[in-house]
């Protein structure tokens, strides 16, 4: 054929075929996906600080070690309450004409997945300390320190955000360490990462390949309620540590704590549910219970783990008692 003997015709024919294939295989399906997927109700646009924090996240190479995708396999249940869907990413847009990076799904997990980190770890103080020195909160962490995002000062200004750093992690820096604007923006972006609940009536995607009982295994023991140790690990351990000893100069100990061991644990219920900010020597505790929608049974399980671990030996509480404490706290707050 003349087509194969004429390099000009062959070039333009192959180019036209390439454009046609790109149109039908890539461009049209992408447009169709955009038209068929919209942001979930309740999803929020990022603020200016969160947008700036996203750019810092990119520039510091965080996407090289952290993913933002909850796959539909059981091993990913720890990262989110449900598998990710297309609508989770529908509201993301290019940074600029020349830069895509709309989604930062990542390709590996040298560090934890961050899809739902805003709910898993809502404490700004924890994130700042983690950025300053990851080993301060997770001894086994291999994440590099981002200490250059923080400034040393002899005296903090009124608008400065001071981070509480244990002495052994200050490494010769001055006593007052404040977060830079870049550090605060990066933390704002991390805290914005949160799975939006699906609308009522929407089928929730299931996690696949769930571990099933193998042949010959005995049946599991009767359900005695939520696992307090697991709930503590996912909600409290990153600050108060697996040993319950906290971090001196940053997070208070639960081991031997008067609040934890008190015969009337209403204050402990209030702290778990609504957070705590009454001691200057420690960072602010977020409202873990409220943020994570913990049920009375789950709060009771966490309390019982704390009240009976690390040498603590206090009376366990029931979910019914927690419900009464929550009602009393709500009534007290209404009066105030």
Image (cartoon, helix red, strand yellow):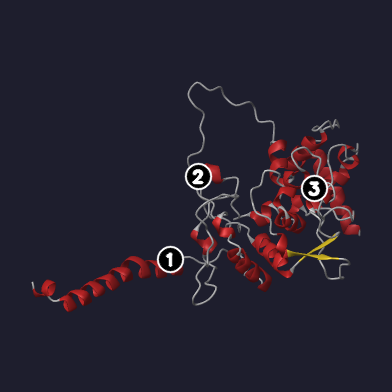
Q: Nearer the viewer, residue 70 or 239?
A: 239
Q: Nearer the viewer, residue 222 or 335?
A: 222
Q: Nearer the viewer, residue 315 or 223?
A: 315
Whether residues under marks 1 and 3 lie with C-beta atoms below 8 angstroms apart, the answer is no
Q: From this viewpoint, is residue 198 visible?
A: yes
Rendered-image quadrant of the N terminus: bottom left
- Please state the horizontal and vertical placement of residue 194, each as a whole percent of the image: 63, 58
Q: Secondary structure at mark 3?
A: helix
Mark sitting on residue 262: none
Q: Name the residue at 36% across, 67% down.
A: 26
Mark 2 or 1, closer to the camera: 2
- Label 3 crowding class (10 Å Cα cut-off): few <14, some 14-19, many 20+? many
Earlier sequence position, callout 1 versus callout 3: 1
- Please state the horizontal and vertical placement of residue 119, each as a whole percent of the image: 67, 54
Q: Which residue is mark 1?
A: 33
Q: Which residue is mark 2?
A: 73
Q: Name the residue at 87% across, 44% down.
A: 266
Rendered-image quadrant of the C terminus: bottom right
Q: Is residue 244 above or below residue 169?
A: above
Q: CA distance from mark 1 to mark 3?
A: 42 Å
| Res. 12 image quadrant | bottom left
Mark sitting on residue 272: 3
Q: CA distance from mark 3 to mark 2?
A: 31 Å
């Amino acid at each position: 054929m003349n087509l194969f003997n004429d390099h000009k015709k062959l070039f333009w024919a192959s180019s036209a075929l390439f454009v046609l294939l790109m149109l039908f295989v890539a461009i049209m399906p992408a447009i169709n996906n955009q038209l068929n997927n919209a942001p979930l109700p309740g999803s929020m646009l990022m603020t200016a600080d969160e947008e700036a924090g996203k750019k810092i996240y990119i520039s510091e190479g965080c996407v090289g070690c952290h993913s933002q995708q909850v796959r539909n396999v059981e091993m990913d249940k720890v990262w989110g309450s449900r598998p990710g869907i297309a609508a989770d990413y529908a509201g993301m847009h290019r940074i600029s004409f020349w830069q895509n990076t709309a989604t930062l799904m990542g390709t590996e997990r040298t560090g934890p997945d961050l899809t739902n980190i805003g709910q898993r770890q809502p404490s700004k103080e924890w994130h700042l300390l983690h950025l300053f020195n990851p080993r301060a909160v997770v001894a086994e962490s291999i994440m590099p320190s981002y200490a250059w995002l923080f400034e040393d000062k002899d005296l903090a200004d009124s608008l400065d955000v001071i981070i509480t750093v244990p002495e052994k992690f200050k490494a010769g820096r001055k006593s007052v360490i404040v977060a830079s604007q870049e550090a605060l923006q990066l933390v704002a972006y991390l805290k914005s990462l949160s799975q939006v609940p699906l609308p009522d009536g929407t089928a929730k995607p299931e996690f696949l390949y769930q571990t099933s009982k193998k042949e010959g295994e005995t049946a599991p023991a009767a359900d005695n309620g939520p696992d307090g140790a697991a709930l503590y690990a996912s909600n409290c351990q990153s600050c108060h540590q697996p040993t319950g000893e906290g971090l001196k100069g940053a997070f208070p100990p639960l081991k031997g704590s008067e609040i934890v061991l008190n015969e009337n644990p209403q204050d402990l219920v209030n702290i778990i549910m609504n957070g705590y900010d009454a001691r200057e020597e420690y960072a602010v505790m977020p409202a873990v219970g409220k943020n994570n929608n913990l049920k009375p049974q789950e709060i009771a399980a966490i309390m019982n783990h704390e009240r009976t671990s690390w040498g603590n030996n206090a009376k366990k509480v029931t979910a019914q008692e927690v419900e009464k404490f929550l009602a009393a706290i709500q009534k007290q707050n209404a009066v105030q």
